[in-house]
Image (tube, rainbow, N blue to C red):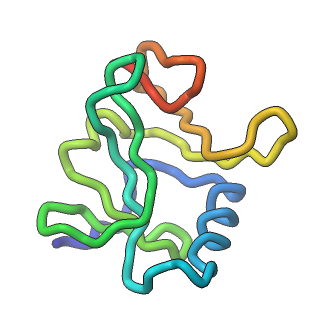
Amino acid sequence: METTVSAPIKLTNNAITEIKRLMGETSFVEGQHLRIGVKGGGCSGLSYVLGFDAVEADDQVYDMEGIPVVMKDAHGIYLLGMEVDYSDGLNARGFVFNNPNASSSCGCGSSFAV
């Protein structure tokens, strides 16, 4: 496990606020990190992974505004330059992925193709 200074993605202020709120919940397991990544599947080919998880041996570790973040090094090619936002509007509530590497995405915003 290696700690890297500059993360390949960005968290907006809204995302940071919501993640820190979730980390303050009584159900949050101490020592877990925010995992950001991709997995096969979804209507466009790849789906985003965003959740709390334990650090694994092949993870890159980042500190983003006091939030411990982990990501597989191999996922960087899909996520480089991506911005994670949080929307709390009436029509849409949840995390939003703005990925410049996506050639297309589905209507739900959680699946994309490269």
* Image height of 111 relative to 92, above or below: above
Seen from this angle, which residue lies furthest right?
Answer: 90
Is the C terminus in the top left, top right, bottom left or bottom right quadrant? top left
* Image height of 25 relative to 51, above or below: below
Q: How many numbered marks appear?
A: 0
* Image height of 108 relative to 96, above or below: above
From the top left corner, tell me how far across and down residue 94 is, in percent: 66, 46
Give the residue displayed 76% in from the left and 36% down from the top.
92
Q: Quadrant of residue 13?
A: bottom right
From the top left corner, tell me how far across and down residue 52 is, in percent: 42, 65
Give the residue displayed 64% in from the left and 56% down from the top.
15
From the top left corner, tell me how far across and down residue 31 is, in percent: 38, 83
Asked if residue 57 lies left or right of residue 51, the reply is: left
Seen from this angle, which residue lies furthest top?
Answer: 104
Give the residue displayed 73% in from the left and 43% down from the top.
93
* Image height of 103 relative to 68, above or below: above
From the top left corner, tell me how far across and down residue 9 is, in percent: 44, 48
Is the N terminus in the top left, top right, bottom left or bottom right quadrant? bottom left
Give the residue displayed 61% in from the left and 70% down from the top.
22
